[in-house]
Amino acid sequence: METKLPLEFRLSRLTVASLRNLCDTNKVAGASNLLKEDLVKFVLDNFDKSTLSDFCSAQEEIYFVEGMAKAIKWAASRKIVEIDPRSDHTMVNGLFTLRRSDGYEVYKIRFVNHTTDDAATSCECMDARDRGYFCPHQMTVLVRCLADGLFTLDQWAGPMSQEAEDLILANVFGKRRRRS
Ligand SMILES: [Zn+2]
């Protein structure tokens, strides 16, 4: 997955555990007592940019594929995801509602120009607003739109990865990997 986000921001949205793990794996000592902000500075000082960028990409791919696996389950429930029937190929409005033990998680999701190069997607959750992730709530709306035939995977211009696409093809459409 490609991203134009600055490296420091991409590092800052990873967990402290995964940043420490990066240091441990590479036998870089001195990270164990650092808190998030200092830890991000520490890895920027101790690793080269391409290593960090690759590490972020790998973590982002894990986030994306794990989120997509959840989204495929959630998208099957009309209680969890609703698409505004006026939605079309220029604009999709979705509502995500998930019951938790302590109440409900409710987020509004919007895709604008999602089949063109200037695709914009948003969700009200922290992962999307503060961390710039294409969150599992947006993925749920996406999967529902695809399952309902509002648009196809080929038309979708928003975030996607090969592995996530394979998950959708296999679990939503019962197809194996596409050859392109
Ligand atoms: Zn979200």
Image: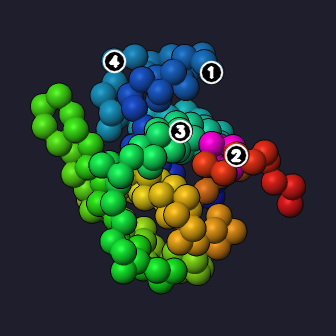
Q: Position of residue 35 (x, y in %)?
A: 30, 28
Residue 174 badge:
2
The residue under label 3 is 69
In this view, 139 is above or below 63: below
Mark 2 nearby-residue class (10 Å; few <14, some 14–19, many ≥20) = few
The residue under label 4 is 33
Residue 155, by quadrant, is bottom right
Residue 52 shows in this picture: no
Residue 146, by quadrant, is bottom right
- Work out whether mark 1 precedes mark 4 in sequence or the reverse, and give the earlier one: 1
Amino acid on which disc 3 is placed: Ala
Disc 3 or disc 2, which is closer to the eye? 2
Task: Check the image and tell me how it is coloured.
Answer: rainbow
Q: Which residues are magenta?
A: 166-171
In this view, 96 is above or below 89: above
Residue 170 is covered by the magenta coloring: yes
The residue depicted at 12 percent of the width and 31 percent of the height is: 102
Amino acid on which disc 4 is placed: Asn
In the rendered view, does 17 fall on the left or right side of 37?
A: right
- Work out whether mark 1 precedes mark 2 in sequence or the reverse, and give the earlier one: 1
Amino acid on which disc 2 is placed: Gly
Marks 3 and 2 in Cβ contact (< 8 Å): no
In this view, 23 is above or below 42: above
Disc 1 or disc 2, which is closer to the eye? 2
- Work out whether mark 3 precedes mark 4 in sequence or the reverse, and give the earlier one: 4
Closest to the observer, 177 or 21: 177
The residue depicted at 30 percent of the width and 54 percent of the height is: 96
The residue under label 1 is 26
Q: Label 1: state its secondary structure.
A: loop
